[in-house]
Image (cartoon, rainbow, N blue to C red):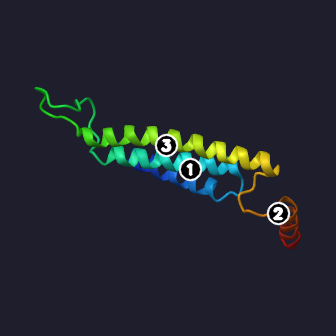
Amino acid sequence: MEFLVASAIGILTAAGLYLVMRLRTFPVILGVSLLTYAVNVFLFASGRLTIGAPPILTDAQTYTDPLPQALVLTAIVISFGMTAVIVMIALGAYLGSSDDHVDDLPAKEARDKRKAEEDAA
């Protein structure tokens, strides 16, 4: 089970980093979201992976640590809020410049730069 969780964290992180390195706003937003999910799963797994154990003290023999669960729930709420803010900022930038590149170049310069890179390749 630990191997599956570690693999999921690695895959989410790799996909998130790949998407963040794209220079368009929508893939960057998706990449940041995937990185957020990877961090949440990492935080959740840091409290030991136990199946069927209650998160509070009861008469049960084993219990799971409730602190990582509380941290993950807080992180999920914060990440939803930050994603909404980033989407609104990206939408405003797209509507203002009619371009969704994140490299801060005007549209014409970005096209010329991409065309020069394509010609060089």
User: What's under tag 2, amino acid-wise?
Assistant: Ala
Number of callouts: 3
| Residue in view at x 22 percent, y 29 percent | 54
User: What's under tag 3, amino acid-wise?
Assistant: Ser
| Residue in view at x 42 percent, y 45 percent | 40
Residue 121, position as x, y percentages in the image = 83, 71
Vertical arrangement, residue 52 with respect to residue 25, above or below: above
Residue 82: give its label. Answer: none
Tell me the residue that label 3 is attached to.
79
Whichever of labels 2 and 3 marks the residue nearer the N terminus, that label is: 3
Tell me the residue that label 2 is attached to.
110
Q: What is the C-alpha distance between the residues marked 2 and 3?
A: 31 Å
Q: Residues within 10 Å of mark 3 (few under 14, many from 20)?
A: some
Q: For the residues labelled 2 and 1, say whether their Cβ atoms are less than 8 Å apart.
A: no
Q: Residue furthest top?
A: 59
Question: The residue tagged with tag 2: helix, strand or loop?
Answer: helix
| Residue in view at x 38 percent, y 49 percent | 42
Taking depth in this image into account, of 26 and 54 the one nearest to the observer is 26
Dividing the picture into quadrants, the one containing residue 66 is top left
Q: Residues within 10 Å of mark 1 (few under 14, many from 20)?
A: many
Question: The residue tagged with tag 1: helix, strand or loop?
Answer: helix
Taking depth in this image into account, of 91 and 51 the one nearest to the observer is 91
Taking depth in this image into account, of 60 and 40 the one nearest to the observer is 40
Whichever of labels 1 and 3 marks the residue nearer the N terminus, that label is: 1
| Residue in view at x 49 percent, y 47 percent | 36
Tell me the residue that label 1 is attached to.
32
Residue 58, position as x, y percentages in the image = 13, 27
Which quarter of the rendered picture does the N terminus lie within? Answer: top left
Q: What is the C-alpha distance between the residues marked 2 and 1?
A: 23 Å
Q: What is the C-alpha distance between the residues marked 1 and 3?
A: 9 Å
Question: The residue tagged with tag 3: helix, strand or loop?
Answer: helix
